[in-house]
Image (cartoon, rainbow, N blue to C red):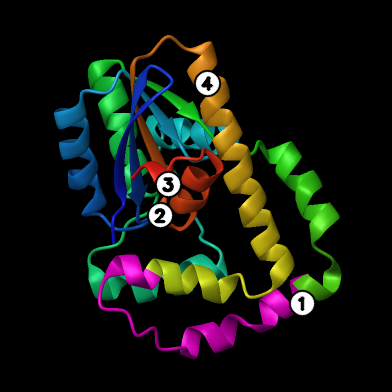
Amino acid sequence: MKRVFYYDFKGKKLLFFGTIKGLVSEREKLKKLYENFQAEAIFLGISPEQLKGLEEYLKEPFEIEPEDYEVIYALKLEEYGEVGLPVPTYLEAFAISRRDGVELLPLDIPEEEFSELFVKTIDIFHILHYNFRKRKIWRKKFQADTPEEFVLMWDREINKIKPYYTIELKREEYMSRKIKELMNEKDYGRILIIIELERLYGVLKNLNLLQTT
């Protein structure tokens, strides 16, 4: 499955990388993409608060306690390679930023806005249903030959409860708008954009870029 896209867009050169969250091998993929592209800035598909949290983690590492679904995801992803936390791709983006002075900018919904969206979209019955499905998903056999196939199957499975999928669509819309906003605000000509593979195609669709591939 294609997960690297290059565009000349509104006078700027954009390289999109749909990363697989958790795989340690993604660090090397990102490193090679950056070296070949020589980005002047990196846009990350995480929230401002997550970006700040990663900065604090790198200054003084602390124990991270993953949620139940994250644990299940990681255990199943191990079939395709070594898994690490925090997300190895994002750690590599920070390493690049520190080494070369490349600016990192967050794309995802800020925490307060996300909380408001969650409360408007999800009710207690959705939460109970979501929690009750953990055991079913743990027992499910994902018939995927590649990590790309697995993460897309996983995404479809955990978003079978429609309001949760609605939130993911809102994230795609927000990140698309944020990319445009940052492109207008910043004078960078070469931008590397890192988004989880599950959301990449939705973001590209919102930017009207898929038909140009």
Alpha carbons under labels 2 and 1: distance apart: 27 Å
Pointer 3 local density, CA inside 10 Å: few below 14, some 14–19, many at least 20: few
Q: Amino acid at mark 4?
A: Leu
Left or right, 122 with respect to 21, comes to right
Q: Is residue 147 magenta?
A: yes
- What's the magenta region? 127-150
Q: Please name the residue that numbered disc 1 is placed on.
A: 128
Dot 3: what SS?
helix
Q: Please name the residue that numbered disc 3 is placed on.
A: 210
Pointer 1 local density, CA inside 10 Å: few below 14, some 14–19, many at least 20: few
Q: Quadrant of the N terminus?
A: bottom left
Q: Amino acid at mark 3?
A: Leu
Q: Please name the residue that numbered disc 2 is placed on.
A: 197
**Residue 205 seen anywhere in this rendered image of the structure:** yes
Alpha carbons under labels 4 and 1: distance apart: 38 Å
Q: Which one is nearer the viewer's eye here, 31 or 71?
A: 31
Going 23% across and 21% down the picture, which residue do you hit?
Answer: 99
Residue 135: quarter of image: bottom right
Q: Please name the residue that numbered disc 4 is placed on.
A: 182
